[in-house]
Image (tube, helix red, strand yellow):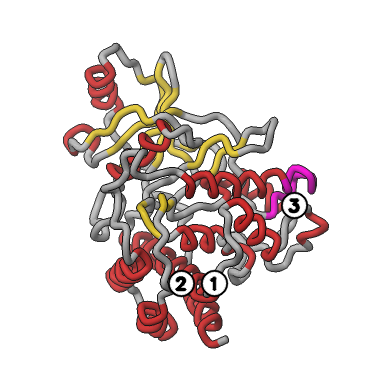
């Protein structure tokens, strides 16, 4: 990707924009609710919509005293079990109290009469969000620090005792991969817009080849670069965002998803990929080095059956993009730039299929 294209992508997804008409809400109702909930007078001065993100509409809410981020369910017809902002609020609240880098949770509202859909608020974290996995505008040294902070933060998340954090009932502690495959198969079928043979073959193959891994930890579900806020001075992760897919489960599922830019097909700027980059020259670890660092941080000797996790990851990404494509067709996508297409989905499904053939 050229520097010009990188800058265009950074500008396209960074910051805020005026709220789209179909995502507007009554800020006076929000101010009244906040005043009652926080037991103080709240005056809302500005509401803007964040540019990035397709899943749950996200807003920057400035009051006379502080700045919040509001996340809500999208309006309109939604897929079953999707957009569970109550779970997102719960895990952020627990992790903040566990000294993990997330925004402070402020308040949750399940009353649809306030904004039309349920929502929650958290503190706004000032920092840098990067939208290009190659970090083209940084030095090799800074890139190395950012990649090491990403993997160190993931290892820290996986080391948290979910029972002590109050998340013992946040998800089931067995058969994580089987449940995820079943869930994403259902979501994919519910959002299917055309027949993709490779997706159907993977839906059949994956449940029959699940590794026997009994580990359980807190799972983010979408742990990637643009879901993190970095400190511009230290290059450390300041906050991890977007917890809507979080649950309890197999730590390797989360790690290999995070590893995806090293083995994902390069389909353009829409999907992050490191396939065509000189990693050493850029100060970015190779796939083998990154796996080794993860194993070091989590006291592992190696990762067995990693090809299963890679196939599952690419298949799941394809299912996610199928869901976005369906929401675009239905007019419920959170971002007007949700320009995925069927070719991307097919490319990911076919790449996943290659892993199970080898």
Magenta segment? 134-144
Report which residue position mark 3 lands on.
3
Q: Tell me, for residue 304, which label it has, or none.
A: 1
Q: CA distance from mark 2 to mark 1?
A: 14 Å
Kindly indicate the quadrant of the structure image that contains residue 45.
Answer: top left
Spatial CA distance of label 3 from label 1 is 38 Å
The answer to which image quadrant residue 81 occupies is bottom left
Residue 150 left/right relative to 169: right
Q: Residue 312 — which label?
A: 2
Badge 1: how crowded within 10 Å, few (<14), some, or many (20+)?
few
Question: At 56% across and 44% down in the image, what residue appears?
Answer: 153
Residue 184: image x %, image y %?
34, 67
- Closest to the camera, between mark 2 and mark 1, is 1
Q: Please report the residue visible at 47 percent of the width from the left and 42 percent of the height from the top.
A: 241
**Circle nearer the viewer, 3 or 2:** 2
Residue 76 located within the stretch drawn in magenta: no
Pointer 2 local density, CA inside 10 Å: few below 14, some 14–19, many at least 20: many
Does residue 337 appear to the left or right of 119 in the view shown? Answer: right
Tell whether 15 sits left or right of 315: right
Give residue 70's position: percent from left, percent from top.
37, 34
Where the N terminus falls, by quadrant? bottom right
Checking the image for residue 84, the label placed there is: none
Residue drawn at x 41%, y 27% is 68
Extreme-top residue of the structure? 41
What SS does tag 3 mark? Answer: helix
- Which residue is pictured at 44% across the width and 83% down the height? 198
- Earlier in the chain: of badge 3 and badge 1, it is 3
Q: Circle 2 sits in a helix, a strand or a loop, which is it? A: helix
Work out whether residue 325 or residue 185 is closer to the camera in this orientation and state it.
185
Q: Secondary structure at mark 1?
A: loop
């Amino acid at each position: 990707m050229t520097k010009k294209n990188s800058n265009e992508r950074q500008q396209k997804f960074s910051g805020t924009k005026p709220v789209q008409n179909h995502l507007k809400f009554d800020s006076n109702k929000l101010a009244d609710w906040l005043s009652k909930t926080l037991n103080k007078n709240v005056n809302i001065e500005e509401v803007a919509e964040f540019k990035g993100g397709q899943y749950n509409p996200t807003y920057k809410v400035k009051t006379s005293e502080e700045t919040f981020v509001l996340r809500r369910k999208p309006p309109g017809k939604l897929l079953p079990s999707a957009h569970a902002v109550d779970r997102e609020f719960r895990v952020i609240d627990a992790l903040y109290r566990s000294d993990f880098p997330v925004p402070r949770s402020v308040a949750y509202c399940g009353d649809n009469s306030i904004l039309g859909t349920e929502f929650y608020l958290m503190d706004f974290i000032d920092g840098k969000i990067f939208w290009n996995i190659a970090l083209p505008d940084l030095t090799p040294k800074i890139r190395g620090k950012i990649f090491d902070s990403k993997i160190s933060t993931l290892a820290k998340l996986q080391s948290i005792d979910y029972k002590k954090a109050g998340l013992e009932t946040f998800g089931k502690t067995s058969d994580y991969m089987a449940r995820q495959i079943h869930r994403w198969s259902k979501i994919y079928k519910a959002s299917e817009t055309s027949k993709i043979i490779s997706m159907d073959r993977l839906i059949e193959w994956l449940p029959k080849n699940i590794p026997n891994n009994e580990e359980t930890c807190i799972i983010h579900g979408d742990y990637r670069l643009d879901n993190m806020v970095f400190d511009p001075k230290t290059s450390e992760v300041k906050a991890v965002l977007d917890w809507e897919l979080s649950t309890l489960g197999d730590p390797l599922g989360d790690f290999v998803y995070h590893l995806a830019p090293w083995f994902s097909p390069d389909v353009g700027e829409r999907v992050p990929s490191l396939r065509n980059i000189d990693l050493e020259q850029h100060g970015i670890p190779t796939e083998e080095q990154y796996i080794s660092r993860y194993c070091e941080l989590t006291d592992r000797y190696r990762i067995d059956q990693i090809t299963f996790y890679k196939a599952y990851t690419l298949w799941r990404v394809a299912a996610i993009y199928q869901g976005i494509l369906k929401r675009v067709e239905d007019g419920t996508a959170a971002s007007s730039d949700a320009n995925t297409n069927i070719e991307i989905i097919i490319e990911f499904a076919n790449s996943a299929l290659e892993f199970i053939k080898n």
